[in-house]
Amino acid sequence: MTPRPIARITGLGACLPPTVVTNADFEKSLDTSDQWIVERTGIRERRIAGPDLTLAEMCRVASTKALAQANLSAKDLDVIILGTVTPDRRLPATACDLQALLGATNAAAFDISAACPGFVYGLAIARGFIASGQANRILVLGAEKLSTVTDSTDRSTAVLFGDGAGGVVVEPADDSGRGILSSVLGADGTLADLLYIPGGGSADPVSEKVVRERSHFIKMAGREVFKAAVLAMSRACDGALAQAGITADQIDLLVPHQANIRIIEATAKHAGIPMDKVMVNVDRFGNTSAATIPLALDQGVAEGRIKPGSLLLLVTFGAGFTWGSVVVRW
Ligand code: ACO
């Protein structure tokens, strides 16, 4: 039986930086080709935020839209949760900078570090806050400036990542049956070194050595990550569907993490969801980590593919490894 939702999404907003970097741009600086990038990843272009566009500002733009849609003012917010691995500063949390920018004076604010699943982890936390009665109006964002941790000289990662921000307002569910029906989260820290930033943390603080060795940038064993991503996302979908008491054929739209079109296709195939019911925008924005799902939701709504009552399956995977899946009746 489908459970009654406790929390529902009442507002949505996104922000994409204006600068577009195409595969042809990489052909000028790296030993790569548009053909390789498109065939192996499905990516054609990505958006990059320059030094003048902070993560907090991208979040502010997305949040303002989400709040307007929810008919709330920033002062109504109880909590701000930001999923990101690229905060503007190591201290404080960018969620606090955002709280100040918005004037959300009544809100607690914190970042969560769960890599690409940061937004889905945030949704699950928001749902828990509402279930416990601790908070009622929660802003959940996924936002990244991955361009700041991507090594422009490493062709195996440089072409993959992009920047962007998206977020939603989560409030208690009403009687409509709309809301978050299930959530499954997971992690496997034994595989952390397959996708990580080795230097610049407290284990190996910023130093000349770190910069010289370029260890402040993302390192990834792509093939191994690929296999783990397909397995974990497939299992997470199964778990979230089972917990929601629904079957894949009832899903109106699969909204997967946008890292690679081949991972998306394999996950959809496992779930038994045809590609015409799958949100894909990795071609335009690349992998924006925690931002991919809210960006895809925003596009899905704008294109009329997500309507009130649509049944959505969100699924994601990233560094940690971490993964998560959520079923939402929009
Ligand atoms: N252009 C041309 N050749 C390249 C490029 C490039 N940009 N990048 C790698 N290659 C080469 C490699 O050097 C290798 O050459 P070799 O055979 O001579 O050694 C060859 O292409 C094949 O490399 P693979 O890594 O095996 O290629 P693969 O088909 O696996 O594709 C990719 C690589 C796109 C990275 C893929 O493995 C992938 O998408 N992995 C998962 C990424 C992901 O899901 N990340 C998770 C979330 S990210 C986060 O959490 C922040």
Image (cartoon, rainbow, N blue to C red):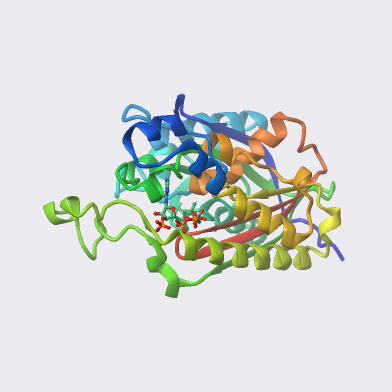
Q: Residue furthest bottom?
A: 190
In the figure, 115 relative to 167: above or below? Answer: below
In the figure, 197 relative to 228: above or below? Answer: above
Query: Can residue 307 be seen here?
Result: yes
In the figure, 163 relative to 224: above or below? Answer: above
**x then y, percent, for residue 153:** 29, 44
In the figure, 243 relative to 98: above or below? Answer: below
Left or right, 219 with respect to 291, comes to left
Q: Quadrant of residue 68?
A: top right
Asked whether 106 or 263 is in front, the reply is 263
Q: Quadrant of the N terminus?
A: bottom right
Left or right, 86 with respect to 37, comes to left
Asked whether 107 or 164 is in front, the reply is 164
Q: Quadrant of residue 324?
A: bottom right
**x then y, percent, for residue 314:** 67, 52
Q: Quadrant of the C terminus?
A: top right
Residue drawn where x is 81% and y is 44% of the image: 310
**x then y, percent, for residue 249:** 85, 56
Asked whether 23 or 199 is in front, the reply is 23
Q: Residue furthest top?
A: 18
Residue drawn where x is 35% and y is 29% of the image: 50
Residue drawn where x is 77% and y is 56% of the image: 5
